[in-house]
Image: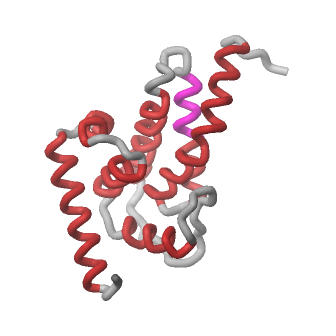
Amino acid sequence: MARSLWGAELEAEFEEFVAGAWPRLRHAGWLLSHDSHEAEDLAQAALARAYANWGRVTRDGAYSYVHRSLVNGYIDSVRRRRPVPVAQTGDTAVAGDEASVDDRSQLSEVLAELSPRERSIIVWRYYLDAPESEVARQLGVSVGTVKSTASRALARVRSAHIASGKD
């Protein structure tokens, strides 16, 4: 049995954080990637980076640290590969939220139409409920970029929604 270099208190604290954060991290990964396997990979990689730095991560900033790591991991994965259109069948939404399957499916379709940057900003701003200044800081862009990108993305979503004849 491998012994932790940390001590029981830090180890228990990290395990508690992971247990509470896992569903939300996995869902955020799915909202970004539209792939449940990639969502789990993104969440695991973000948690692995947090584990390696847990002694330096402030408990108040732990979620922000891990969310930023997750989004950065997603952005890096998009840079390494050519974007592939999201199939309408085959992948399932991550379970654990209260939204219905139809709502998740519709959300997936909406997010699939956005660029990776727009998707990242929308997920940070509206799913993770981060203020514009925090999104800007986490993504390394200006607050104006967050505002304009979110505005354009939401306008695209609205126009696609209206054009499709949905209420």
Q: Is residue 106 above or below residue 153?
A: below
Q: Is residue 25 above or below residue 81?
A: above
At x 22%, y 39%, the residue is 141
At x 61%, y 38%, the residue is 20
In the picture as drawn, the residue positioned furthest to the right comes out as: 1
Quarter of the image for residue 159 reads bottom left
Quadrant of the image for the C terminus? bottom left
Quarter of the image for residue 65 reads top left
Q: Nearer the viewer, residue 95 or 76?
A: 95
* Residue 164 image point, x, y percent: 31, 86
Q: Magenta segment range? A: 44-52
Magenta-colored stretch includes residue 153:
no
| 90 on left or right of 127 | right
| 73 on left or right of 5 | left
Quadrant of the image for the N terminus? top right
At x 31%, y 88%, the residue is 165
User: Please, which colouring scheme is shown?
Assistant: secondary structure
Q: Main secondary structure of the magenta part?
A: helix
* Residue 30 image point, x, y percent: 51, 57
* Residue 15 image point, x, y percent: 67, 29
At x 42%, y 72%, the residue is 109
Quarter of the image for residue 19 reads top right
